[in-house]
Every structure is written in structure tokens, then in C-alpha cells.
Image (spheres, rainbow, N blue to C red):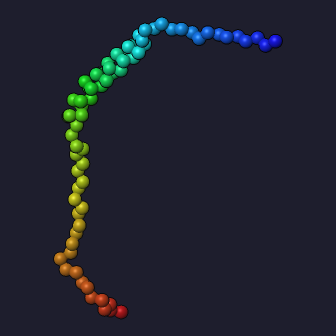
Amino acid sequence: MTTIVNTPSTKTDSNGIGTLISVILVLGFVGIAMYFLIPTIRNMQPAQITVPAPQVVIPDKVDVNVNQEK
């Protein structure tokens, strides 16, 4: 004959204290992040990138003679 073992599930009577602690920790983390990040974001300036103008030398006289002497 087959023996059936019926183990009852474990009961935990935590009354939601773990959820309460998790919510408090998340709110604390969000509060600290906001405290430090909002002033940092407000003080951000656009990056100052200086690109020098190219130096192009243009001669005063250009010889466009297409007939070359041999």
C-alpha cells in the first residue's frame, strides 16, 4: 500500500513588517538620490568644445594656363 506524506506549509506571521521595511528603505534611497542629484542636474553646463578654424592659404595669383610648354 502507498504511503502519502502530507506536509503542511509553513506559516509565517510577519504582519507585513518585511514589506514595511522595504518601503522605508526604497523611500530613503529615492530621497537621498533626489537630494544629491537634483542640484547636480541643475548645475550642469553644456560642454565647452573649442574647434579651431582651419587655416587655408589662398594665393593672390593663380596660373590657369592649360597649355604646357615642352
Quadrant occupied by the N terminus: top right
Q: Which residue does the image show at 32% across and 90% down from the upper left?
A: 68
Residue nearest the viewer, comparing 10 with 18? 10
| The quadrant where residue 27 appears | top left
| Residue placed furthest toward the front | 1
| Residue placed furthest toward the top | 13
Q: Which residue does the image show at 38% across and 13% down from the upper left?
A: 21
| The quadrant where residue 63 appears | bottom left
Residue 22 x, y percent position in the rendering: 39, 17
On screen, residue 57 versus residue 28, left or right, reads left
Residue 33 x, y percent position in the rendering: 30, 25
Residue nearest the viewer, comparing 70 with 6? 6
Residue nearest the viewer, comparing 66 with 35? 35
How many numbered markers are drawn? Answer: 0
| Residue placed furthest toward the right | 1
Identify whether 2 is placed above or below 49: above
On screen, residue 6 versus residue 54, left or right, reads right
Identify whether 67 is placed above or below 35: below
On screen, residue 65 versus residue 25, left or right, reads left
Quadrant occupied by the C terminus: bottom left
Residue 51 x, y percent position in the rendering: 24, 54
Residue 2 x, y percent position in the rendering: 79, 13
Q: Which residue does the image show at 59% across and 11% down from the upper left?
A: 9
| The quadrant where residue 58 appears | bottom left
